[in-house]
Amino acid sequence: MDFNATLIGEMIAFAILIWFCVHFIWPNVTKAIEERQLKIADGLNAAERAHAELKDADSKVAAEIKQARQQATEIIDRAQQQANQILDKARADAVAEINRLKANAQDDIASMAQRAREELRERVGALAVQGASKIVQREIDPATHKAMLDQLAAEI
């Protein structure tokens, strides 16, 4: 191998190129690589945090859904109880109204029966007086007639 000036010149040029690259280009390249690595690491950390937050959010959503279902069940149960109470009260009110109407009807029937008895007594009394009048063949004055009817009605 021939060691000549061209080889030495190429070696010096190559050494200068390496020195230039090491001092001026390599720091910028390593800096860019390190920045890119930091960005990638930050992105991975953010993705892991987002994944953890997503799991937390999923568990919170599941808990909220469970709580909402429980509250809905409680509301439905309370509504059912209120509906039952309203129905029971309506039934009790209806029974009370029926009993009141029945009592009123019985009172009306009793008063109508009493009036019918009194009217019947008066008619029987009038018939008795007329019969007695025909038997006696004389007319009784109205005051005596009224007194006899009242007495007869009291006796019947």
Image (cartoon, rainbow, N blue to C red):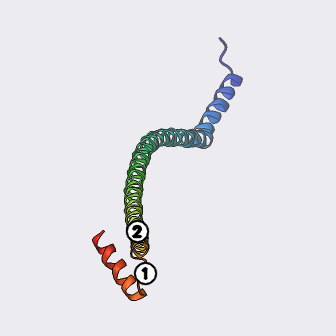
Q: CA distance from mark 2 to mark 1?
A: 19 Å
In the image, what residue occupies the spot 46% across and 42% down?
49
SS for dot 2: helix
- The quadrant where residue 129 appears: bottom left
- The quadrant where residue 14 appears: top right
Name which residue type carries label 2.
Answer: Val
Label ID, residue 124: 2
* Proximity of marks 2 and 1: CB atoms separated by less than 8 Å: no
Question: In this picture, is 154 found above or below 47?
Answer: below
In the image, what residue occupies the spot 44% across and 82% down?
139
Question: In this picture, is 130 found above or below 4?
Answer: below
The residue identified by callout 1 is 138
Instruction: Give the quadrant of the N terminus.
Output: top right
- Give the total of numbered labels: 2
- Residue 120 in percent (x, y) is at 41, 67
In the image, what residue occupies the spot 34% across and 80% down?
148
- Residue 126 in percent (x, y) is at 43, 73
